[in-house]
Image (cartoon, coloured by chain):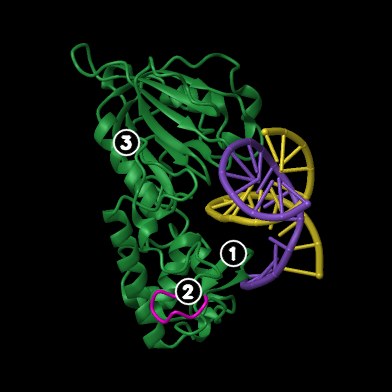
Chain colours: A green, B purple, C yellow
Amino acid sequence: MPELPEVETVANGVDARVRGQRIVDVWTSGKPQTFKSPESAIVEVLTGARIERVRRVGKTIVMDLGREPNEVKTQIPPGNDSKKNKGKRRDGEDDSSAPSGAQFLVHLGMTGRLLVSRPEVPWPPHTHAVLSLNSGPNETAGRELRFVDPRRFGRLSVVMPSRDEPGGYTGPGAEPTTISAEDFAKLFKGRKLAIKAALLNQSILHGVGNIYADESLFRAGIRPRRQAGRLTRAELARLHAALQQVLAHAIELGGSSVSDYVDADGVRGFFQLEHMVYGRAGELCKTCAAPLRKIVVGGRTTVYCPQCQR
DNA sequence: CTGACATCCTGACGGC
DNA sequence: TGCCGTCAGGATGTCA
């Protein structure tokens, strides 16, 4: 399941392959729940746009889009999205033609994959969007960027720059890789929920999922059910350090490959070999040899060492 | 407001 | 061998 390190790996891999290329054609599957913005808006914003950069924000892959100055006004099919313009406006429902600064957001959900493939390679099952790319007449033209997602927990959307977020999409919570120890500690002040649930809450801290929550709690020696607001300064400092170390190490190794996660090249990561607790319920703690215990916290399977975590 | 819990969806896996 | 039940879980919506 793609969390921060996996999403970062994918985003970097895709960036290296498609940066600067133009989207010449867009196909979407029509599966409604995959598209958080109307498909017509996604197609309209993407078609003809240039991919300036691909990066990660939280667990979301953000593509910054640009357009040639002389063709900023795109053809808007009349009536194509007219029925969606009443009521409250959501992401991507801006009715101006795609301006510079539009962004394409890809959330991989559980099983989503973003693959850069040659067009002659057959589409995998459960392909939901295909962007045909062409960087120019003499370059590696004709490649495709494909979004594949069997379980359809992934989401695609487009956003326009707004007054709220003039710099574009910033994600729902704090960024764990760069947050200071003090700011990190403040996030949990007065919170009554379990520290594990707090780590998973994307509006508090974005990017951390089940694997890295369990792994960082183990490395910090903290039980997952402890109340977030009752952790000591020292514990919060250890958790901050552990989380940042675990995330950095996982990014170095290309993420964790469990179930079917692969990067933009279809290559698996290696961090799963470093897991101390995740997926190891009933096995022995690598530190103290006590049997690891499995519980449910915040509706998520949680594995911890009753000996090492207090 | 805060937290707990069900829901979506399909493939993998274990048991019989 | 093959079938069927169970499980996995990020974000969202609903409920207490």
At which x and y percent is residue A159? 46, 38
In-front residue for pair A204/A17:
A17
The nearer-to-camera label among 2 and 1 is 2
Vertical placement of residue A142 versus A10, above or below: above
Q: What element carries label 1?
A: strand
Q: Residue A157 carries which label?
A: none
Which picture quadrant has residue A152? top right
At which x and y percent is residue A14? 32, 36
Q: Within the magenta stretch, is there residue A286? A: yes
Residue at the spot of label 1: A301
Q: How far apart are marks 3 and 1 (CA)?
A: 31 Å
Vertical placement of residue A227 versus A170, above or below: below
Residue that extends furthest to the top in the rendered view of this protein: A137
Q: At 57% from the left edge and 30% from the top edge, which residue is drawn? A: A38
Q: Give the range drawn in magenta.
A: A285-291
Q: Which chain carries label 3?
A: A
Q: At 48% from the left edge and 76% from the top edge, which residue is drawn? A: A188
In-front residue for pair A190/A78:
A190
Q: Residue A14 carries which label?
A: 3
Question: Do badges 3 and 2 share one subunit?
Answer: yes
Q: How far apart are marks 2 and 1 (CA)?
A: 17 Å
